Amino acid sequence: MNEATSPKRVALVTGGIGGLGSEICRQLAQAGRRVIAVDLAARDERIGAFRQEMADVADTVTFEPGDISDFDSCQQLIARIEQQHGGVDILVNAAGITRDASLRKMTPQQWHELMQVNLDGVFNMCRNTIEGMTTRGFGRIVNISSVNGQTGQFGQTNYSAAKAGVHGFSMALARETARKGVTVNTVSPGYCDTPMVAAVAAEVRAQIIAGIPVGRLGSPADIARAVCFLAADDAGYITGANLPVNGGYFMSF
């Protein structure tokens, strides 16, 4: 089905005002989706910048505050969206944080804070949208994992565990919903040109780029393109898959 002539699906993107999230919102809007960016309400300056960035697609992109680490907050969020916009057809779980430390120095707080966002958040959002998707007979869920969930990374036992867990979760849910018209897939970005990577020391960043076969960092557009592919109406025969977008940094069969 041509996306331009398909129904105007409602797409919800968590972490929607972040480096990756905002580009995902843009590309989904350009594909004809009605997009709702979900993020913490406390980031006033970033919310304002996001609205300016989305000026050319402002008629189809809106912001909705929400705390994905809290189940009740997610339940209330989805209820509001369903009342205002209709059911959620496409869910992109892009919200994520880091709390880096070697395991010997990692505190229980660093572990739990990260899990509450990076893994519990995926459960909270999927749990509150899956019933509507299966009832309507259509849904696209794309969960953002990471190359470090595949390879592990020094100082990221919490992050790597959560991101590996995201794909395990996705495969299991894909089996539960496959006959209901709902696909569940994972995109695993490599190192991308985002503020998080820009904060890395220049010499470390140079080492990272040297290890990427295509010779550059990824862009948010590279990741958003993969998300839009999996979220398409005619992508119904792809489910339980992990799509690595890492420039060849990690390859597996």
Image (tube, helix red, strand yellow):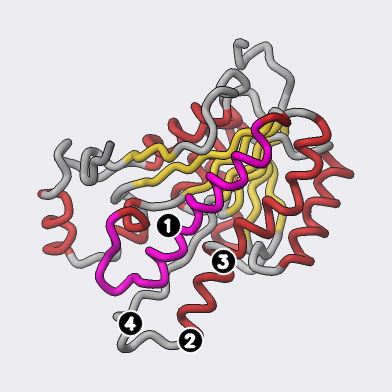
Q: Tag 2 or tag 4, which sits nearer the N-term? A: 4
Q: Tag 4 or tag 1, which sits nearer the N-term? A: 4
- Residue 164 in the magenta stretch? The answer is yes
Q: In x, y percent, where is residue 216?
A: 19, 42
Q: Residues within 10 Å of mark 4 (few under 14, many from 20)?
A: few
Identity, as a three-letter code, of the amino acid under mark 4 = Leu
Magenta residues (range): 151-178
Q: In x, y percent, where is residue 205?
A: 18, 58
Q: In x, y percent, where is residue 159?
A: 41, 66
Q: Tag 2 or tag 1, which sits nearer the N-term? A: 2
Q: Residues within 10 Å of mark 1 (few under 14, many from 20)?
A: many
Separation (CA) of disc 1 from disc 4 = 17 Å
Identity, as a three-letter code, of the amino acid under mark 2 = Pro
Identity, as a three-letter code, of the amino acid under mark 3 = Val
Q: Tag 2 or tag 3, which sits nearer the N-term? A: 2
User: CB under 8 Å between callouts 1 and 3?
Assistant: no
Separation (CA) of disc 3 from disc 4 = 19 Å
Identity, as a three-letter code, of the amino acid under mark 1 = Ala
Q: Which residue is mark 1?
A: 164
Helix, strand or loop: magenta stretch? helix
Q: Tag 4 or tag 3, which sits nearer the N-term? A: 4
In the rendered structure, find residue 29 and report the number of the disc placed on it.
none
Secondary structure state at the residue bearing disc 2: helix
Q: Which residue is mark 2?
A: 108
Where, by quadrant of the figure, is residue 149 drawn?
Answer: bottom left
- Residue 172 in the magenta stretch? The answer is yes
In the rendered structure, find residue 103 and report the number of the disc placed on it.
4
Q: Which residue is mark 3?
A: 117
